[in-house]
Amino acid sequence: NLPKYVKLNHFLSIITETLQQGKATLMCLANKGFPSGWSLNWKVDGVSTTREVTGSPGVLDKNGLYSWSSTLTLPVDQWKKVGSVTCEANQGSQAPLSETLRRDQCSE
């Protein structure tokens, strides 16, 4: 009886080295999901974005469950104007699961 859901982790912290290069990088991790056909999508202030997004295909673990990751990269000047980012996990006709990170929750 495998669970038909993905548990969304909180975002990882912003990678400092990337900030120094004029970019802010956010990563969304989703783990222990089934089946493999989940996709991770990003919204910036509630608006879907596909720019500067890289994702990995589902990775199967020893328990027969999958994990995914997706990375969103924004120019620092744009990141400083953002109120929140949302990572949304979608699979077929199921209701999407989402996790939102407010920029004021992040350390500079």
Image (cartoon, rainbow, N blue to C red):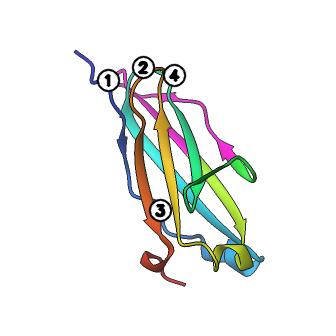
Q: Mark 2 points at which residue?
A: 35
Question: Mark 4: few, some, or many residues within 10 Å (few <14, many ≥20)?
Answer: few
Q: Is residue 17 above or below residue 54?
A: below
- Name the mark nearer the viewer: 3 or 4: 4
Residue 64: image location, x then y, percent: 36, 20
Closer to the camera in the image, 16 or 104: 104
Q: Mark 1 points at which residue?
A: 4
Residue drawn where x is 49% and y is 44% of the image: 88
Q: Is mark 2 on a helix, strand or loop?
A: loop
Q: In this view, does 32 lie to the left or right of 25?
A: left
Marks 4 and 1, how far apart in space? 11 Å
Marks 2 and 3, how far apart in space? 24 Å
Q: What element carries label 3?
A: loop
Asked if marks 3 and 4 touch (Cβ < 8 Å), the reply is: no
- The amino acid type of the residue labelled 3 equals Leu
Indicate the quadrant where residue 31 lies: top left
Q: Mark 4 points at which residue?
A: 37
Whichever of callouts 3 and 4 sits on the residue coming sooner in the sequence is 3
Asked if marks 4 and 1 touch (Cβ < 8 Å), the reply is: no
